[in-house]
Image: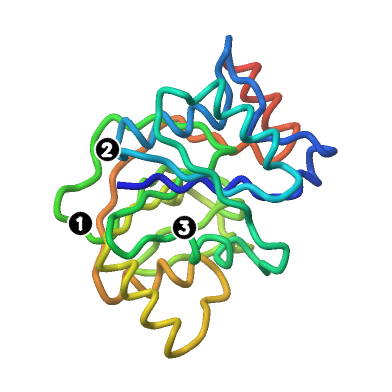
Amino acid sequence: MLTILPAGGRAERFDGIYKELLPIGPRDFLLSAAIRRGHALGAERALVISNQDKRPTHERFLARHAAEFEVELSVRSENDENLWSALRREIPVDEASFLVLPDTSWSCPGRIPPGADLAFGTFETDEPYRFSLIHDGRILTKPDGLTGSWQAWGCVFWSADVAAFWRDHQAAHGEYDHYDRAFEHAMQVFGYDTFPILDYRDMGNWDAYASFMRAA
């Protein structure tokens, strides 16, 4: 199984600082912790999606802080319109894959459900406008106007069969315009499972990162 970690953003919300390389403890960082989580859930190797400007820094970081894992690095195209455009070229069709967002932190007490073609690691949130929600066989992407507690996905597993389905569908009908639409389509065809992830934190901006560090 391959862990895919998209880290090719432009760092605009962090004033040019690469948020996936932010420290979260003594000699521990968001990106290296994300690689470890994928490995703990069964991934034999990892792929970090970088960009041309970040690549030298990512290469040095991975050589120093993730040397014990099998990690590859790819460079995102400047023409990619969204995250799915970067992801879909890197998804292998001959093995299962696991998407981990490297600017997040969470723990998983269990395992990916055996035999699943598609499974979401989910957590409970009372901020539905910030996340992609799993609801009634659909994915609601950062919806406005909702209140209360909802289940959101924080990581995604898919089988080689799902990857081949996406490849064939896009060859015939064009690219999905968002990763949630690809996941939702697979839910409708393959069904889906969920497994709980705990203590989910999204370090999407400085305030979220500072709050995480204060609580650590």
Q: What residue is disc 3 on?
A: 133
Q: What residue is disc 2 on?
A: 42
Secondary structure at badge 1 equals loop
Q: Residue 116 shows which numbered tag?
A: 1
Measuring 51% from the left and 57% from the top, which residue is drawn there? 132
Q: Of the residues shown, which amino acid type is indicated by label 1?
A: Ala
- Outermost left residue: 115
Calculate the distance from the C-alpha at mark 2 to the C-alpha at mark 1: 14 Å
Image quarter of the C terminus = top right
Measuring 54% from the left and 22% from the top, which residue is drawn there? 65
Residue 59: percent from left, percent from top? 61, 34
- Outermost top residue: 26
Mark 1 or mark 3: whose residue is earlier in sequence: 1
Residue 209: percent from left, percent from top? 68, 29
Q: Of the residues shown, which amino acid type is indicated by label 2?
A: Gly
Q: Of the residues shown, which amino acid type is indicated by label 3?
A: Leu
Calculate the distance from the C-alpha at mark 1 to the C-alpha at mark 3: 19 Å
